[in-house]
Image (tube, helix red, strand yellow):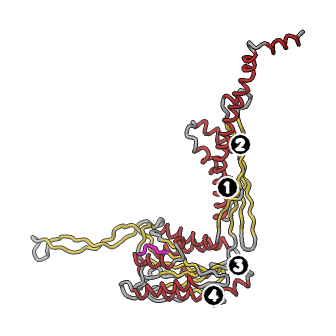
Amino acid sequence: MQSIQFNRLLKDRSGNFGIITAVMLPVMLGLAGIAVDVSHALDQKSRIQALADAATLAVASAMADKGNMSEQEAAALGLKTFISQTLASDGSLTPEQRAEEEKKLRDATTFQTTSTSSNNSDSYDVLMKSTYEIPMNGMSAVVGFKTLKVTVESRASSGREGNALSMYLVLDESGSMAWDTTTIDPVAPSKKVKKQRKEKYPCPDNEAIMCERLVEEYVDAPNYIVKMASLKTAAGVMFDELKKADPNSGLIRVGASSYDDKTKSEQKIEWGTSEVSKYVTKLPAKPDGGTDASGALTNAYAALKAENTREKNAHDAKKNKSFERFIVFMTDGEMTGNGGIWSKKIHDQVMGICEQAKNDKDAGGNPIKIYTIAFMAPAKGKELLEACSSGKEFYYEPNNMTQLVQTFGEIARKAAKTGTRLTN
């Protein structure tokens, strides 16, 4: 009997469409809502993946830079970076909502770090996983979906990749290196300087008339760090970076020569940075003299040129299959010799040595690469060093101590090929 009534209902055209529509409408609305939410979720996943990648790269870079960062420190840095960037993009959150979202992210995010050391290199791997709940719209809720979980995973690696190299520093110790920079000494920010002033007093022969005399007194003045001290600090940062890249002194060899208008005794290229560090420390605190880099640059070229097998033999003995050659040429002036004016002859001579070095190819066809640093230098100095460099990315123009320190550190990292890469 019930079957007959149901058949009649199906054959009844008057309300069939309405009943079917009433039954199917929630389902169709739910499916439409899900389609919208899935599209939104994909956009959110892409955004969160980018933030996760940024966080793992930041952690991997920090681990390589510091060298001894603990797993707890790395995880804390990664969480801080990821959470702050994730929540920064949503300005509509109240403080309470922000705190709640931060707790959810912390609970749902993990960082795993792995450090690997070999004789000549260190590497750091960072793996991050996070699950993020995205609220779904009202239409999706009709069919029972209130949130959608999005999971992201990111992996980044960094390391001191074991780039064998021989480097020679050509450093300016001319008189202008005794001049002040624009950086105040944070340890002793002021100093006493002698100053003269005019003072009036009654003339001894006739007190009705006022005479003048110069009076010397000591007054407080800003204590700026001089260029030479800045150079020593910057070189120290370079040596620290090179030591991180080659802790066992089996990859990196460094030497140096300084100059004013004369070429000073050189530090031969040796393994590691200890000897060259001593050499730079002994540079005069109060330098003097003019500027002629030709002799020191000649020393650099002679030490590194391909026909001089000393460097190749040294690297072969350490089983370094290949090595790169670098000159780091720094000046704060223009080529004057022992005079006070620019010398075209010395300028051109230095330029010629640079060209010789850049054209010197090893067995693999690789030239000597020249980094140049024009530290608070005049126009002619900048012109020379830009032309001497191996290209735009090898030329630097630091105008204060902070920039000089950054420059030497960056050159060390570039030469040693320390870097960070995304591997997910």
Circle 1 packing at 10 Å, graded few (<14), some (14-19), many (20+), is: many
Q: Quadrant of residue 377?
A: bottom left
Q: Secondary structure at mark 3?
A: loop
Quadrant housing residue 190:
bottom left
**Residue toward you, 375 or 348:** 348
Q: Are marks 4 and 1 in contact (CB under 8 Å)?
A: no
- Tell me where residue 370 appears, x and y as whole percent: 55, 78
Which quarter of the rendered picture does the N terminus lie within?
Answer: top right
Prevailing secondary structure of the magenta residues: loop
Of residues 389 and 311, the one drawn nearer to the viewer in this rendering: 389
Q: Amino acid at mark 4?
A: Ala
Label disc, if present, on residue 56 of the rendered structure: 1
Q: Could you give the CA–CA distance between mark 2 and mark 1, rounded to whole angstroms?
A: 18 Å
Q: Quadrant of residue 125?
A: bottom right
Q: CA distance from mark 3 to mark 1?
A: 30 Å
The Cα–Cα distance between marks 3 and 4, rounded to whole angstroms, is: 20 Å
Circle nearer the N terminus (4, 1): 1
Please give the name of the residue rendered at 70% of the width and 83% of the height, measured from the top-left corner.
315
Left of 33 or right of it: where is 171? left
Q: Is residue 63 visible?
A: yes
Residue 250, labelled with which disc? 3
- Select label 2 or label 1 by which is in front: 2
Q: Where does the magenta region start and end?
A: 373-378
Is-magenta flag for residue 45?
no
In this picture, residue 171 sits left or right of residue 366: left
Q: Is residue 197 above or below residue 364?
A: above
Q: Residue at x 75, y 65 (%)?
A: 116
| Residue at image mark 4 | 306
Closer to the camera, 3 or 359?
A: 3
Residue assigned mark 2:
150
Residue 77 seen? no
Q: Which amino acid, mark 3?
A: Gly
